[in-house]
Image (spheres, coloured by chain):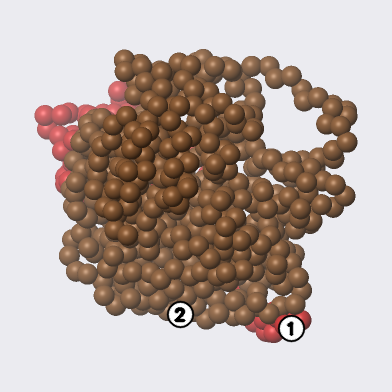
Chain colours: A red, B brown
Amino acid sequence: MKFGAMFVDVLRSVFTRPATRLYPKVRTKAPARLHGKLYWDPKLCTGCTLCVKDCPADAIELITIDRATKHFVMRYHADRCTYCAQCVVSCRFKCLGMSNEGWELAALKKEAFTVEYGSEADLAKLFAVEHPGEGIPPAGEKPASALE
Amino acid sequence: MTTESLLQQAESLLATMSRGSTRPETNRLDVVIESSGLVPAVSALKNARWGYLTALTGLDLGVEAGVVEALYHFCSDAAVTTLRVRLPRIGGSVPSIYQLIPAVGFYERELAEMYGVTVTGMPDDSRLFLPDDWPVGVYPLLKDFDPQSAQPVKVPPPPRGSSTGERFIIPIGPQHPALKEPGHFEFTVDGEIVTAARMRLGYVHRGIEKAVEQRNWIQSLYLLERVCGICSHTHSVAYCLGVEQLAQVEVPPRAQAIRELIAGLERIHSHLLWLGVAAHEAGFDTLFMYSWRDRETVMDLLETVSGNRVNYSANILGGVKIDITAEFAEAIRRGIDYLEERSRHYLDIVTTDTMFLQRTRGIGAMTREQAEHFGVLGPLARASGILRDVRVEAPYGAYTRFPISAVTAQAGDLEARFVVRLKELFVTCNAIRTILDNLPPGELAVKVPRRIPAGETISRVEAPRGELFYFIRSTGGDKPDRVKVRTPSLCNWTSVLHQAIGCQLADVPLLLAGMDPCFSCNDR
């Protein structure tokens, strides 16, 4: 039985640096394995949509531009994503991967979390379909992605 | 006794009540009984001290079959005996077994409100999970439940004035400055002494059991992982084990070892978190802050290894996603060496600090008999001298290869609960070291079919708070037909509410914290 069993700990802390990190002044590096932003390689994709079927959060849309020549656009909703990486496991053609980017997810608008992947030509085709008569999007119209 | 002889014993005990029995799996016995035979059947098992009631599952077999089943699962070591009471879908009724097993109170209330089964003789038949404004006669877990029918109804305000007579009731929660979690308690007091206690849950009920019936087997894994933010890995292990049993696939040894390793890290994280919360409830905020500072070590380890900080998503059906390389193994070793040293220091503090011991020693003591009567699980049971630990009683996954020794204490008071949990940290650290030294080589996962063969299975795993129970039913499709989740917190409430009676009101917060309640687990 003793009084003040943690007194020594407290006294020692007077002479040590605080455990609190000085965020946002000092930014911690994301761990190498962090499940962050999802990446998609359009060249390898066959359009099997297993990633879409298995996604627990409905975060992936695979939009077909031309099925015969295997041209797709992936629309990824980082705000819905739970970062479980099941899509990466489900993909049989290794066209998905998670990077350790997107460590600090914050933005004022939801649109900033929607990312589109695909070749430039496919993205332009998709834009033409979704925004008929608007031409090519001027640079900087879309809000800056929160993931960069 | 072996599992086989335990099941034979149960079969002979239930022979007179049985209307047919089957052996769906090697460790399970299903006995069909009439609802009139329920009380004698439960008495027979209880009088022979055959295991304990672990869960009560409601099961709707569909509109065509017209049957709702109430399944009373009893466990003794690895053996599971299920009493199946078949009831009509509308107007079914079972007698309450609360007088025999008090822990069933919450389960029966859940069965009644989710399936519309009338449980006769319940001491408290008020709502437990469903909102107060939920319409009468709408039962959400029935297969033909229509969400449109669940329109909120007007609730009359609670009676004011002296309708409660001479009693003085202190309500706590669901919003309360001293209780951070969404539960509602009513403590009836006589001066400073508690004379009655009751509680209400469901303020953050998410209907996960219903939601998984809408998702495929893989999507359900991630939803079930989110039942709890602390023991998330344990939930996904329990689900994976069940689905793998149904699909009859063998998980590679390396994957099993990694699952146990992550579960070990998670246990360290959970117990350190609890240590801080319990110390805070006792007014010992220094211990709270230091233990949570150290907990960051294990949180960082989990994040480094799995890539996620809270819902690690380490599991997939058939194995794990992540490998433990030599570099990670070294980081884990360093981390747990530090944590073990700190835990020894904390054990020293909680067993010697005079002020703290005044809040814990001899408070809320639960004898072995009481603990068995209330059917408590996990560290709470082990602090009262009952060896109740699924990892020891019915080893699953890698626990056969890397066994664990259970930590028990005899006193059953709050101090014993601190000692048991802290000593478990040492056992866990040693187990992690053993796994890292002997990590089996090989594959990380095997393929699991997208459609799981029809069948029913039970998987039990030891979460940091006690036994976690999953009942999984497949009809052969790509979605589960029923997933029942019974979390350890729900079992342990009964004992704590009974124990609070006769205690000082000031001891109640620490008494509640002493069981490590998880509201998220309750309101799954």
Residue at (59%, 80%) from the top-left corner?
B345
Residue at (41%, 65%) from the top-left corner?
B264
Q: B301 or B92: nearer the eye?
A: B92
Q: Amino acid at mark 1?
A: Lys
Residue B394 placement: quadrant: bottom left
Instruction: Report the residue marked by disc 1.
Output: A2
Q: Is residue B251 above or below residue A117?
A: below
**Residue B219 shown left or right of residue B365 in the figure:** left
Q: Quadrant of the N terminus of chain A?
A: bottom right
**Residue B74 shown left or right of residue B229 in the figure:** left
Residue at (68%, 53%) from the top-left corner?
B499
What is the x, y in percent for residue B145? 44, 19
Tell me if mark 2 has few (under 14), some (14-19) or many (20+) residues whose alpha carbon lies within 10 angstroms of its own: some
Q: B170 or A96: nearer the eye?
A: B170
Q: Amino acid at mark 2?
A: Asp
Q: Chain of mark 1?
A: A
Residue at (52%, 29%) from the top-left corner?
B95
Instruction: Report the residue marked by disc 2.
Output: B337
- The number of numbered badges drawn on the structure is 2
Q: Chain of mark 2?
A: B
Q: Is residue B42 above or below residue A130?
A: below
